Image (cartoon, rainbow, N blue to C red):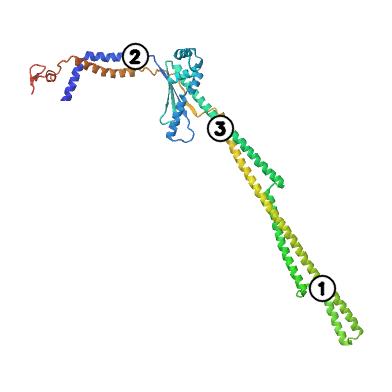
């Protein structure tokens, strides 16, 4: 009941104060229309650039990177570059405005760049790496040229920053490369000097040759030592008579021994037949003695030959032993030289790898500094806007209607509060503080009792 009465009272107040209500609404709408047509139109030109991130970045890191790029685009350096691209640094009207505003104090380009930035808006996208650059101006062509100038200045500034960083890196790499080149030359010089001093071109080949010679001498020594031991044993056997077979195997000793046995047999036969005093027995005995003397001489010669063979074998074994010792020393020296050469070779290879890596990094830095493309690409260049961004008459009209309605309601109730009238029968007990007996209907034929 209360809600129904409240709505009835609201309608009654608006209907009763409709002149004030319409006047307030009309005033607000008319004021909005006059203001919309009185304000000069402003045009907004927009351009879009894509910022290429380096490497894989997570969302938070890349968002920070995009915000940094937006701040750079709105920096004084980019703004001054855009000012020069637009040719405004020599604009007489702008200089006159600067003189009037600050009396010619400070730097003109910084002041003019600050004025440009006041009308520039840069918005990073939420879920992409695109920056939207917009500029508002009463002149649509100027707005488009200014946005494109800022985009061009931003791209050039990014390239300059990369070139500056690459130049510094290149200088640092060049210094490092020179030191590594000196280390490489020193390592190569040491290896060359070592090979020249030792008269070798390949340490591994020299070491293999010396090692093969050592193996050959070792085999010869074993053979000669075995032969010397055999000859010494034969000599000892021949000297103590237990090795007479070695002497008897001599051809001359064998021949004389056989002849001596035959002559001794003949001597025994003559003695048994003619007796010991017979002249033939004496002659035969003399011949046997001579033959025995020859046999003894031959036996001594054979024994001395065995001793000479033993001596020669021992001397050859001693000679080979000495050569083996000398060769072993040469092998150890060659091994030491090979190890030294390997150390120098490893130093040389390490220095060469470090130098090659530094050269590669230097070349990359040089290529990077010479590249004309930054890490920013223009997605959409600004075009001359055909429709002004402000004022928006339809939007302003709709807003003025809403605001006017609210204000008209306020005005109607304000006027009502200044001049109260009885509009509803419910107002009698509330405003007059009197009881209401009945309510007569509009056709005056019936009455509705109250209470």
Q: Is residue 145 visible?
A: no
Of discs 2 and 1, which sits in the foreground?
1
Please give left or right for residue 367 compared with residue 136 in the image.
right
Residue 4, image quadrant? top left
Name the residue nearer the viewer: 77 or 287: 77
Which label was assigned to residue 59?
A: none
Name the residue nearer the viewer: 253 or 47: 253
Q: Is residue 337 visible?
A: yes
Query: Quadrant of the image for the N terminus?
Result: top left
Question: Which is more N-terminal, label 1 or label 3?
Answer: 3
Q: Give x and y (percent) for residue 134.
A: 43, 22
Q: Is residue 48 above or below residue 333?
A: above
Disc 3/disc 1 C-alpha distance (Å): 98 Å
Q: How many marks?
A: 3
Disc 2/disc 1 C-alpha distance (Å): 154 Å
Q: Give x and y (percent) for residue 26.
A: 27, 14
- Name the residue that disc number 2 marks: 35
- Name the residue that disc number 3 marks: 169
């Amino acid at each position: 009941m209360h809600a129904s009465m409240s709505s009835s009272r609201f309608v009654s107040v608006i209907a009763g104060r409709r002149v004030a209500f319409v006047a307030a609404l009309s005033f607000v709408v008319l004021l909005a229309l006059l203001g919309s047509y009185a304000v000069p139109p402003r045009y907004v030109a927009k351009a879009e650039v894509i910022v290429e991130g380096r490497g894989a970045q997570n969302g938070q890191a890349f968002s920070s990177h995009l915000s940094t790029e937006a701040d750079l685009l709105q920096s004084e350096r980019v703004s001054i570059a855009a000012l020069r691209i637009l040719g405004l640094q020599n604009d007489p009207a702008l200089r006159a405005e600067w003189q009037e505003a600050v009396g010619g104090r400070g730097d003109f380009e910084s002041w003019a760049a600050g004025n440009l930035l006041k009308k520039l808006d840069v918005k990073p996208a939420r879920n992409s790496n695109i920056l939207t650059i917009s500029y508002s101006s009463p002149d649509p062509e100027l707005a488009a040229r200014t946005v494109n100038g800022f985009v061009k200045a931003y791209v050039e500034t990014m390239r300059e920053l990369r070139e500056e960083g690459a130049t510094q890196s290149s200088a640092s790499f060049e210094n490092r490369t020179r030191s590594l080149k000196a280390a490489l030359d020193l390592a190569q010089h040491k290896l060359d000097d070592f090979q020249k001093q030792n008269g070798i071109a390949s340490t591994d080949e020299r070491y293999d040759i010396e090692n093969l010679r050592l193996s050959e001498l070792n085999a010869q020594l074993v053979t000669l030592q075995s032969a010397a031991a055999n000859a010494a044993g034969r000599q000892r056997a021949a000297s103590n008579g237990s090795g007479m077979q070695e002497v008897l195997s001599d051809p001359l000793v064998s021949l004389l021994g056989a002849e001596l046995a035959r002559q001794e047999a003949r001597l025994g036969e003559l003695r048994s037949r003619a007796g010991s005093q017979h002249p033939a027995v004496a002659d035969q005995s003399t011949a046997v003695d001579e033959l025995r003397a020859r046999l003894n001489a031959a036996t001594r010669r054979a024994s001395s030959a065995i001793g000479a063979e033993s001596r020669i074998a021992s001397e050859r074994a001693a000679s080979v032993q000495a050569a083996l010792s000398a060769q072993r020393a040469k092998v150890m020296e060659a091994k030491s030289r090979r190890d030294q050469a390997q150390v120098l070779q490893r130093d040389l290879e390490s220095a060469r790898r470090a130098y090659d890596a530094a050269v590669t990094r230097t070349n990359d830095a040089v290529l990077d500094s010479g590249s004309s493309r930054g890490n920013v690409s223009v997605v959409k260049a600004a075009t001359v806007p055909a429709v002004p961004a402000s004022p928006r008459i339809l939007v302003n009209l709709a807003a003025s209607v809403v605001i006017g309605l609210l204000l008209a309601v306020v005005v109607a109730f304000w006027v009502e509060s200044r001049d109260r009238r009885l509009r509803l029968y419910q107002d009698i007990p509330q405003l007059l503080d009197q009881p209401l007996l009945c309510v007569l209907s509009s056709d005056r034929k019936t009455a509705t009792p109250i209470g």
